[in-house]
Amino acid sequence: MRGIMATIIVILGLFVLHGLEIWLYAFLYLGIGAVDGLREAVYFSTITYGAIGYSDAAMAERWRLVSAIEGINGIILIGWSTAFFVTLIARMRRT
């Protein structure tokens, strides 16, 4: 039971951290005027962070490199989170 609770806490923690990163990028996009509206900024940031991709037409042309950096950042951080989670589960199974 303890292992299940630890797993759930780690999953929720990683979810919150990634969500925070997405929202921070969304606020950055709003702050620099790259997109119009919070909803558009959060949507754009979410699919960029997950490297799903989105039409650059929604973003001001001079800020497109920022979204490319977010995509790379998202892939790296999702990969690290996956590696961390797999390592944690492997260690928990040994005990």
Image (cartoon, rainbow, N blue to C red):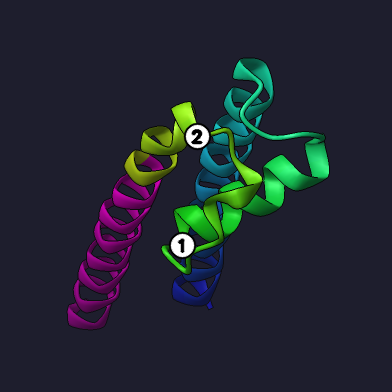
Q: What residue type is labelled 1?
A: Gly
- Element at badge 2? helix
**Residue 82 inside the magenta-drawn segment:** yes
Instruction: State left or right for residue 74 relative to residue 21.
Output: left
Say which residue appears at 41% left-offset and 63% top-offset: 51
| Pointer 2 local density, CA inside 10 Å: few below 14, some 14–19, many at least 20 | few
Q: Is residue 74 above or below residue 22?
A: below
Place of residue 65 in the rendered image (x, y in percent of width and height, measured from the top left): 36, 36
- Res. 66 mark: none
Instruction: State left or right for residue 50 relative to residue 59.
Output: left
- Mark 1 lies on residue: 50
- Element at badge 1? loop
Q: In this view, does 46 lie above or below 36?
A: below
**Residue 22 inside the magenta-drawn segment:** no
Q: What residue type is labelled 2?
A: Glu
Quadrant occupied by the C terminus: bottom left
Q: In this view, does 27 lie above or below 81?
A: above
Place of residue 69 in the rendered image (x, y in percent of width and height, measured from the top left): 33, 40
- Mark 2 lies on residue: 61
- Residues in magenta, as a range: 70-95
Q: Pick whichever, 76 or 2, lies toward us.
A: 76
